[in-house]
């Protein structure tokens, strides 16, 4: 019985180590401190999506984010005319989801997998609480996420300025 517990503990340690290494090697986290990588790993797990699977919908509660390892995700919004407007397609090395950081913590866009997509999933609510207790780590992540917000809003602006095809 004791040997089984030791094997399980070793397997768990190895899985956590692999998860931490995957986070550390992702393009988004390239400049992050070891302390922030460790914090992220505490609230992470692997999550895969299949083609056309909805990842989140505009207006729903935002309480997570993803690092994309492989595959593609379409970020879109619905126009006033009721048609889907693709804002951006993102893929490996990108981060998906920033709305969990900002009030009212509701998704600002829709996100849908365009094919089999492998991600690292982060529980935003407990991570946010941890970052509030560790403001240096919070500032480090917020600085990186702010760049994502700005790029996403620039893409949205570009789409809004394109001539209508209706």
Image: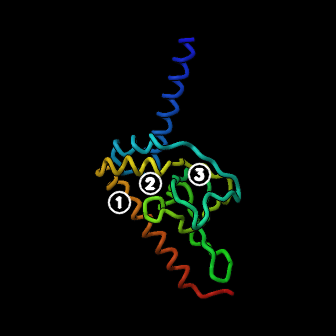
Q: Quadrant of residue 162?
A: bottom right
Q: Residues within 10 Å of mark 3 (few under 14, many from 20)?
A: some
Q: Residues within 10 Å of mark 1 (few under 14, many from 20)?
A: few
Q: Decide: marks 3, 2 in contact (CB < 8 A)? A: no
Identify the residue at horizontal 45%, vertical 69% (top origin): 151
Foreground residue among 69 and 123? 123
Position of 60 compared to 22: left or right? right
The label number, if any, that marks residue 104 in the structure image: none
The answer to which of marks 1 and 3 sits earlier in the sequence is 3
Which x, y percent locates residue 14?
A: 50, 29
Foreground residue among 27 and 45? 45
Q: Which residue is mark 1?
A: 143
Real-space Cα separation, disc 1 to disc 3, in angstroms: 24 Å
The answer to which of marks 1 and 2 sits earlier in the sequence is 2
Real-space Cα separation, disc 3 to disc 2, in angstroms: 14 Å
Q: Is residue 152 above or below residue 126?
A: below
Q: Which residue is mark 2?
A: 28
Which x, y percent locates residue 58?
A: 59, 67
Identify the residue at horizontal 42%, vertical 70% (top origin): 150
Identify the residue at horizontal 36%, vertical 50% (top origin): 131
Foreground residue among 10 and 59? 59
Q: Quadrant of the N terminus?
A: top right
Residue at the extreme right of the image, as rendered: 51
Q: Which residue is mark 3?
A: 70
Position of 12 compared to 34: left or right? right
Foreground residue among 140 and 64? 64
Q: Quadrant of the C terminus?
A: bottom right
């Amino acid at each position: 019985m004791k040997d089984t517990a030791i094997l399980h503990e070793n397997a768990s340690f190895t899985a956590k180590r692999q998860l931490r290494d995957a986070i550390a090697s992702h393009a988004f986290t390239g400049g992050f401190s070891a302390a922030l990588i460790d914090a992220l790993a505490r609230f992470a797990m692997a999550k895969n999506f299949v083609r056309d699977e909805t990842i989140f919908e505009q207006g729903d509660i935002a309480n997570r984010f993803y690092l994309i390892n492989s595959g593609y995700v379409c970020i879109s919004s619905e126009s006033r005319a009721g048609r889907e407007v693709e804002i951006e397609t993102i893929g490996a090395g990108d981060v998906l989801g920033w709305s969990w950081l900002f009030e009212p913590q509701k998704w600002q866009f829709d996100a849908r997998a365009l094919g089999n997509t492998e991600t690292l999933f982060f529980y935003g609510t407990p991570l946010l609480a941890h970052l509030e207790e560790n403001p240096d780590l919070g500032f480090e992540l917020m600085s990186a996420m702010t760049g994502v917000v700005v790029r996403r809003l620039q893409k949205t602006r570009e789409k809004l300025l394109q001539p209508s095809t209706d």
